[in-house]
Image: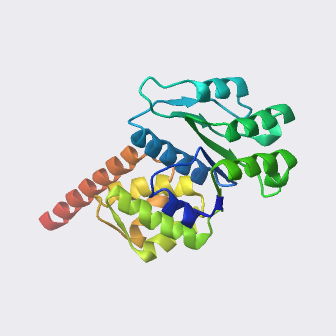
Amino acid sequence: MVLNEQNLKKALEQPLRHGVYYYYSTEEYLVRSYAAKTLALLAKQEDDAEVTRVEGPAPSIEEAVAAAGTISFFGTKRIVELPMLEPSAMNEADVGALCDLMQSLENAVLVMSTVFKDDKAKLSKKAKQLIGAAEKAGLTAELVKPGPQDAKRFAVEKARELGAVLSPGAASELVERCGTDLFALESELSKLAAVAGYGEITPESVSYTHLRAHETRHDLVCRLLLEKKKTLILSRIRYLH
């Protein structure tokens, strides 16, 4: 089955019973995020089973087959990760062999991911072959690149995970400045949460911190502390006069 992101979230709340999990998108953050979440859930479900990672973009199919066919001493399923697959970088024989592996899994789970450079790339013959095989063998999700509203919801949720509160106005200000790049939004939010003392993040703080976007979180906090100290000293000087 091919799911959208909303249905995927619901599916990952249930016990993971599929043999294949394949995530693809033009948005790298979403692909990496859901692949990592799935791997963590599987490892926990399978009593902290080890994950064998077979690197892309054109992974060794022989290595993947060997990893998937290895019998676990503890009776748990083997978890095999195939990250950042690029169908265009794989030859037809390897694509076919990977499709065959998906259909013949017995004691293993494959977690695969692909970041397509554009929407046209996912329509290639080899991409459609992989997607079709994954759909038959397990769970497949196409993760759509977020729009402004999606980015705002992401920012609010990410701030909550950091222990901060992002108001709707601040979320709008942040997306207006960073766009819908989820990596950039996550980076800015880590700074904003620290500056806000993991309390409320205001539109003013978004505007202020973004002017120095290339600072690290540590640099930013140190600068703000110095500026606060400087302001306090100046106020005391004025009081003395």
Image quarter of residue 192:
bottom left
The answer to whether residue 59 shows anywhere in this view is yes
Q: Which sits in the foreground, 160 or 91?
A: 91
Q: Is residue 188 above or below residue 44?
A: below
Q: Colour scheme of this structure image? A: rainbow
Q: Residue furthest bottom?
A: 169
Q: Residue furthest left?
A: 240
Q: Which sits in the foreground, 51 or 189?
A: 51
Residue beneath the point at 76% across and 51% down = 132
Q: Which sits in the foreground, 72 or 197?
A: 72
Using residue 54 as the reference point, say whether residue 156 is left or right of it. left
Q: Quadrant of the C terminus?
A: bottom left
Using residue 164 as the reference point, say whether residue 151 is left or right of it. right
Q: Is residue 222 above or below residue 239?
A: above
Residue 14 screen position, x and y as percent: 45, 57
Residue beneath the point at 69% across and 33% down = 56
Q: Which sits in the foreground, 195 or 72?
A: 72
Residue 31 screen position, x and y as percent: 60, 50
Residue 125 screen position, x and y as percent: 87, 48
